[in-house]
Image: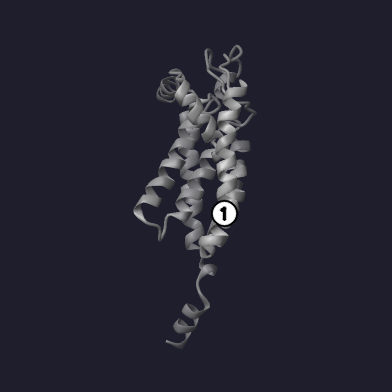
C-alpha cells in the first residue's frame, strides 16, 4: 500500500507542476556544437515530428510521465515488489544497477549534446543537462519493465510495456532527448534485464545439488 501511495503521489506531481507553470514552453537558445552521432536526417525528422506538435493534454500526460520515469519511481516499485513479488527483487536490483552503469558509461564516452543545444525552435518543458546519448530514463523504464515481465499476466505485461514506451516518447516530446537516445536507452534497459535473468549465480541451490548427484 505504501508503494502504491508513493506511485500515486509521484503521478500527482505532474499535474501540480503543469498548473504551476513549470512546464511552460520555451524555445531553445541558438545552436552551437553539432553532435557527431545525432546529426542525421531521420533522427532530426523524428524529433521534429514528436516535439513540434504541442497539445495541452499531451503536456499534462507527459508531465505525469516525467515523474513516473525518473529514479524516484524505484522506491515505490521496490516496496511493491517486496510485498507481492519478493522473488523478483534480486533481478530488479541487478537490472537497475547494470542499466545505470552502462547508460552512464555511454553518456560520458560519446558526450552528445541535448537537442536544444544545437537545434533551433525546440520546445523544452523540463530542465536538461549534458550527455544526451543514451536516455537514462528510457533505459531505466525498459529495464524495470522487462525485468518484471516474466511470469506476469498479459494485461500486466502490456501495461509495463506501454508505460516504458510512454517514458521513452516523453523524453523526446519535452525536448530533452533525440529519438536515437531513447531507442538506444530502451535497448540498454532490455539488455540489462535479460542479463539479470541469466546470471548463473541466481540458480537455486537445489538445482545445483540435483545436477551434482546426477
In the rendered view, tell whether residue 189 sits above or below residue 53: below
Q: Is residue 22 visible?
A: no
Q: Say which element carries label 1.
A: loop
Q: In the displayed structure, would residue 153 be above or below residue 15?
A: below
User: From where the camera sits, is residue 65 visible?
Assistant: yes
- Closer to us: 188 or 7: 7
User: Where 76 sits versus 198, above or below?
Assistant: above
- 10 Å crowding of disc 1: few (<14), some (14-19), many (20+): few
Locate the N terminus and report the quarter of the image it occupies: bottom right
Comparing 80 with 100, the one in front is 80
Residue picked out by circle 1: 1
In the drawing, does residue 27 fall left or right of residue 51?
right
Quadrant of the rendered image containing residue 108: top right
Identify which residue is drawn at 54% across, 40% down: 68
Residue furthest out toward the bottom: 213
Give the percent coordinates (x, y) of residue 86: 54, 64
Colour scheme of the rendered structure: one colour
Question: Percent position (x, y) of residue 172?
Answer: 49, 28
Asked if residue 199 is positioned above or below residue 34 in the image, the reply reads below
Numbered label tally: 1
Q: Residue at x 58, y 14 (%)?
A: 31
Tell me the quadrant of the picture where the C terminus can be found: bottom left
Question: Residue 144 placed where, x, y %?
Answer: 51, 49
Residue at 56%, 18% in the rendered image: 118
Q: Position of residue 171 (x, y in %)?
A: 51, 31
- Residue at image coords 52%, 13%: 121
In the image, 36 versus 19, the foreground residue is: 19
Amino acid at each position: 500500500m505504501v508503494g502504491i501511495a508513493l506511485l500515486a503521489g509521484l503521478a500527482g506531481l505532474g499535474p501540480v507542476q503543469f498548473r504551476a507553470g513549470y512546464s511552460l514552453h520555451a524555445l531553445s537558445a541558438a545552436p552551437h556544437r553539432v553532435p557527431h552521432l545525432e546529426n542525421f536526417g531521420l533522427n532530426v525528422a523524428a524529433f521534429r515530428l514528436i516535439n513540434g506538435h504541442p497539445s495541452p493534454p499531451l503536456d499534462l500526460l507527459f508531465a505525469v510521465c516525467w515523474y513516473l520515469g525518473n529514479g524516484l519511481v524505484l522506491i515505490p516499485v521496490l516496496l511493491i515488489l517486496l510485498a507481492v513479488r519478493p522473488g523478483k527483487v534480486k533481478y530488479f536490483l541487478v537490472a537497475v544497477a547494470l542499466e545505470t552503469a552502462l547508460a552512464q558509461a555511454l553518456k560520458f564516452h560519446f558526450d552528445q549534446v541535448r537537442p536544444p543545444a544545437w537545434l533551433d525552435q525546440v520546445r523544452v518543458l523540463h530542465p536538461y543537462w549534458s550527455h544526451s546519448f543514451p536516455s537514462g530514463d528510457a533505459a531505466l523504464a525498459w529495464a524495470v519493465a522487462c525485468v518484471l515481465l516474466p511470469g506476469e499476466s498479459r494485461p500486466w505485461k502490456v501495461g509495463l510495456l506501454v508505460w516504458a514506451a510512454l517514458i521513452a516518447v516523453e523524453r523526446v516530446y519535452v525536448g530533452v532527448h533525440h529519438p536515437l537516445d531513447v531507442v538506444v536507452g530502451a535497448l540498454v534497459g532490455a539488455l540489462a534485464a535479460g542479463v539479470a535473468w541469466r546470471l548463473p549465480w541466481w540458480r537455486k541451490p537445489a538445482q545445483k545439488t540435483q545436477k551434482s548427484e546426477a
